[in-house]
């Protein structure tokens, strides 16, 4: 799952340990949650080991690595957490998972999981990405470092630990659960609609009041955001080759021939330069953003308020940047983050990239791109626009291979799903900031769009960082009383289920 360096997680005022303790007492009075909290705390080590074991089983869709094992492991964990009926759902790609838990409750809630993670180069990590080591970090606390720690095996593990607390305390869940998962989120969820639109799964989801994904929403200063949607995304690869271009070599040549032979690599660079304006940033694809909906007055007001409650210096520090694009101020940077479609180069490859030089004229070069979409844009519309743009500008020979993608999501602030999130945070002394949309993406459009038209979002206390990056981590024991560790994250999932039942 892509969260734009976790920036959208850093919103709101949090109170200290005393307020948190008082809020837990309020919860205990509301629904007698003390036995559940006690079970969660008692099984802390078990929960951490479960997460470590999950991370130690790589499941990387992009590399077709460990996917069957990863799917089977997640299904086993669901059964151990109390799901009686757990089934694998075949797709044209990696399988999904469907499960139901009937608690005999009046209300039903949908849960979305992903069991795949991003690739990881061990050379870039200070702790091996698939060993899931516990590391002490001064000022932050005890961290679990590993690929998937925050995106998404860590927060999903806190949700599973919450179910274990119900099971071991002999308590019935306050809501029924409909569970759907996929193994291709990190490659753009190309086959997730095949899972959700299977008739029996669709019928089960239609009974839900909403769908949510566990996520550690606290920043290092304790801030939290409730996102009212997410940008869509298109992931694709552009390939320039002598074979398709019918210019340049069909195999690598000695670089001296560059004097008389066209270069597919330069051809790709020239094509890429047409996708953005002279500033190297603003999208310039013909027709790409024609349908992009501008931020409305209400969304701008939310962003304006959020800008006063968020730390610009903390955001820059955690992202390792010194300037926003065009040196815009903090408020405008946030408006761009929520409201601007993007065209991003993830990476460019071609020819020789090893030690020393090789003096060749490469016959092929490629670039990985992603495009972030705002409401009223569609993934298919964006794909059509870039193909037409390249053809119009003399680059019709360049292959455009879409590997995945999906449309943006919108969820009403007044929906029960969102109001239950706000109520849960407020019982912790937290007044949440509502944010127009996550700058990253997740395939929630299958829930928020037709035929389901359900509210969908993310929930959870706790903190993690480094999604898609080296040294990805989840805080297990927090050094900051304003930030919850794993036990507090588990408790928040218990509390949210009760709030969903009562709202």
Image (cartoon, rainbow, N blue to C red):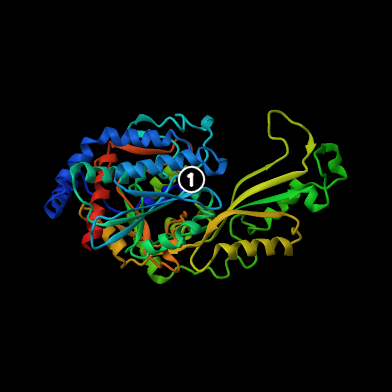
Residue 415 picture quarter: bottom left
Left or right placement of residue 351 versus residue 204 in this view:
right
Q: Which residue is mark 1?
A: 322
Residue found at x 26% / y 62%: 107
Front-most of residues 449 and 342: 449
Which secondary structure, mark 1? loop
Q: Is residue 466 visible?
A: no
Left or right placement of residue 178 versus residue 351 in this view:
left
Q: Is residue 83 visible?
A: yes
Q: In the displayed structure, would residue 193 be above or below residue 154?
A: below
Front-most of residues 464 and 208: 208
How far across and down, in percent of the image, does residue 330 sit?
43, 55
How far across and down, in percent of the image, does residue 454 sit?
38, 65
Q: How many marks?
A: 1
Residue found at x 44% / y 69%: 451
Left or right placement of residue 214 versus residue 256 in this view:
left
Residue found at x 80% / y 49%: 243
Mark 1 surroundings within 10 Å by alpha-carbon count, few (fewer than 14), some (14 through 19), many (20 or more): few
Outermost residue on the right side: it is: 260
How far across and down, in percent of the image, does residue 414 sit?
31, 68
Q: In the displayed structure, would residue 179 be above or below residue 80?
A: below
Left or right placement of residue 357 versus residue 466 in this view:
right
Quarter placement of the C terminus: bottom left
Residue found at x 21% / y 38%: 41
How far across and down, in percent of the image, does residue 438 sit?
43, 57
């Amino acid at each position: 799952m892509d969260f734009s360096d976790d920036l959208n997680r850093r919103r709101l005022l949090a109170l200290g340990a005393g307020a948190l303790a008082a809020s837990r007492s309020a919860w205990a009075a509301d629904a007698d949650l003390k036995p559940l909290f006690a079970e969660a705390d008692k099984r802390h080590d078990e929960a951490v080991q479960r997460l470590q074991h999950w991370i130690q089983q790589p499941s990387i869709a992009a590399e077709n690595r460990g996917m069957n094992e990863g799917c089977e492991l997640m299904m086993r964990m669901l059964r151990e957490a109390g799901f009686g009926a757990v089934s694998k759902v075949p797709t044209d790609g990696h399988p999904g998972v469907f499960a139901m838990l009937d608690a005999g409750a009046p209300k039903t809630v949908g849960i979305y999981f992903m069991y795949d993670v991003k690739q990881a180069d061990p050379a870039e990590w200070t702790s091996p990405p698939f060993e899931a080591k516990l590391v002490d970090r001064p000022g932050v606390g005890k961290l679990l470092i590993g690929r998937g720690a925050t995106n998404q095996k860590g927060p999903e593990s806190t949700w599973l630990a919450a179910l274990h607390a119900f099971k071991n305390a002999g308590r019935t869940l306050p809501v029924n659960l409909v569970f759907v998962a996929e193994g291709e989120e990190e490659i753009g969820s190309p086959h997730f609609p095949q899972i959700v639109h299977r008739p029996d799964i669709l019928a089960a989801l239609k009974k839900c009041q909403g769908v949510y994904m566990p996520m550690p929403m606290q920043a290092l200063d304790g801030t939290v955001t409730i996102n009212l949607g997410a940008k869509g995304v298109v992931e694709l690869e552009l390939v320039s080759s002598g074979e398709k271009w019918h210019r340049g070599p069909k195999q690598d040549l000695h670089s001296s021939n560059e004097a008389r032979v066209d270069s597919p690599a330069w051809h790709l660079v020239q094509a890429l330069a047409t996708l953005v304006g002279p500033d190297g940033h603003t999208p310039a694809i013909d027709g790409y953003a024609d349908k992009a909906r501008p931020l409305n007055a209400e969304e701008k007001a939310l962003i304006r308020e959020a800008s006063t409650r968020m730390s610009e210096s903390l955001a820059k520090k955690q992202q390792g940047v010194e300037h926003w694009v065009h040196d815009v101020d903090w408020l405008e940077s946030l408006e761009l983050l929520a409201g601007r479609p993007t065209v991003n180069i993830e990476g460019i490859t071609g020819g020789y990239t090893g030690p020393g030089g090789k003096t060749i004229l490469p016959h092929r070069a490629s670039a990985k791109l992603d495009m972030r979409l705002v409401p009223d844009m569609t993934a298919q519309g964006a794909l059509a626009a870039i193909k037409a743009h390249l053809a119009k500008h003399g680059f019709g020979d360049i292959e455009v291979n879409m590997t995945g993608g999906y449309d943006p999501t919108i969820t009403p602030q007044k929906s029960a799903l969102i109001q239950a999130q706000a109520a849960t945070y407020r019982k912790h002394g937290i007044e949440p900031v509502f944010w127009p949309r996550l700058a990253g993406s997740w395939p929630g459009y299958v829930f928020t769009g037709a035929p389901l038209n359900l509210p969908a979002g993310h929930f959870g206390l706790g903190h993690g960082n480094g999604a898609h990056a080296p040294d990805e981590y989840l805080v297990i024991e927090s050094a900051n009383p304003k930030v919850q560790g794993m036990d507090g994250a588990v408790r928040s999932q218990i509390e949210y289920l009760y709030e969903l039942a009562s709202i």
